[in-house]
Image (spheres, rainbow, N blue to C red):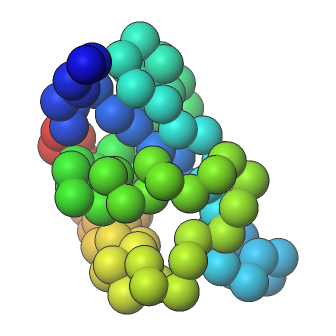
Amino acid sequence: MDTVSAEDRAVALLYRKDHDRAPKVVAGGRGELARRIVQLAEESGVNIVSDPDLVELLSRVPTGDEIPLELYQAVAELLAFIYQVNQDHARNGQAEIATR
């Protein structure tokens, strides 16, 4: 049996307020693929947040699908946090999120 730690999983979400009804899973993977997803996010300036429990749940959502209703609250809190960090960054010229 292959065991994978939470650090070896990654899920990427996309949400466009004026276009999408709900956030979508646009990428997900484990092992080397997860590390590549994180690397691409870092290179693109995408916020990275570590939440192993949420990653576990989101990893069950097929790529391209909207997140299920049961995850709306958790993802909304995550997006609100990222929005606040982005606002702080715009005001102060610096803010970082890189927790894993």
Q: Which of the 4 image quadrants contains residue 30?
A: top left
Figure quadrant of the C terminus:
top left
Q: Which of the 4 image quadrants contains residue 99?
A: top left
The picture places residue 66, in percent across and down from the top left corner, at 67, 69
Q: Tell whether 23 sits left or right of 42.
A: right
The picture places residue 19, in percent across and down from the top left corner, at 82, 76
Furthest-top residue in view?
A: 32
Q: Tell whether 11 sits left or right of 97.
A: right
**Residue drawn where x is 22% and y is 58% of the image:** 53
| Nearer-the-camera pick, 3 or 27 | 3
The picture places residue 65, in percent across and down from the top left corner, at 71, 61
Q: Tell whether 71 sits left or right of 78.
A: right
Q: Which of the 4 image quadrants contains residue 70?
A: bottom left
**Residue drawn where x is 74% and y is 53% of the image:** 64
Q: Tell whether 60 sits left or right of 55.
A: right
**Residue drawn where x is 65% and y is 79% of the image:** 22
**Residue drawn where x is 39% and y is 37% of the image:** 10
Figure quadrant of the N terminus:
top left
